[in-house]
Image: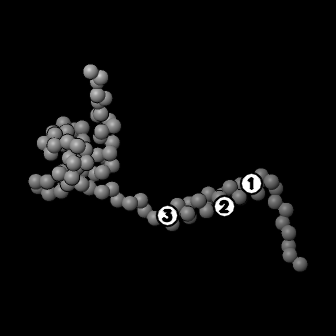
Amino acid sequence: MQPAFIVPAAEWESLTARLARLEAAELARQAPPPPLDEVLSTKDAAIHLGLSVDALLRARRAGRLQGVRLNEKDWGFRRSVLDKYPRRYYRAAQAA
């Protein structure tokens, strides 16, 4: 014979909600980490944006583009930052 417990409806809802939160937290903990953002060299970043290397470095010096220091001389640029750049500073071509 199995014992039966009578649980009030409010307590039952509270317990099932807590169980759902715990299961969601466990799934989030087991999820693989997001992929690392690729860092492009200055030349590759300029090609990706369709700019010259000098224009890309001017944009970095002006603060319009965030760069990553690779060594004493070279800079790198994260692909996610580069993907946001054209949309932010894009000027529509004016009709002649």
Q: Which residue is mark 3?
A: 31
Task: Provide the secondary structure element on which disc 2 rests.
Answer: helix
Calculate the distance from the C-alpha at mark 1 to the C-alpha at mark 2.
10 Å
Q: Residue at x 19, y 39 (%)?
A: 59
Question: Identity of the amino acid at label 1?
Answer: Glu
Mark 1–mark 3 Cα distance, whole angstroms, equals 27 Å
Q: Is residue 60 above or below residue 20?
A: above
Extreme residue toward the bottom, this view: 1
The answer to the question of whether label 1 and label 3 lie on touching residues, with beta carbons closer than 8 A, is: no
Disc number at residue 13? Answer: 1
The residue depicted at 10 percent of the width and 53 percent of the height is 73
Residue 12 coordinates in the image, percent (x, y)? 76, 57
The residue sitting at 56% across, 64% down in the picture is 26
Q: Is residue 24 left or right of residue 78?
A: right
- Seen from the viewer's position, the closer of residues 84 and 50 is 50
Disc assigned to residue 1: none
Q: Return the residue at label 2.
A: 19
Q: Which is more N-terminal, label 2 or label 1? A: 1
Viewer-nearest residue: 73 or 80: 80
Dot 3: what SS? loop
**Residue 18, horizontal then vertical, whole percent:** 66, 58
One can see residue 40 in this view: yes
Looking at the picture, does residue 18 appear above or below residue 88?
A: below
Q: CA distance from mark 2 to mark 3?
A: 18 Å
Which class describes the residues within 10 Å of circle 1: few (<14), some (14-19), or many (20+)? few
Which residue is the extreme one toward the right? 1
Q: Is residue 76 left or right of residue 88?
A: left
The percent coordinates of residue 52 (x first, y second) are: 16, 43
Q: Residue furthest left?
A: 73
Mark 3 is on which residue type? Answer: Ala
Please state if 73 lies on the left or on the right of 51 as rendered: left
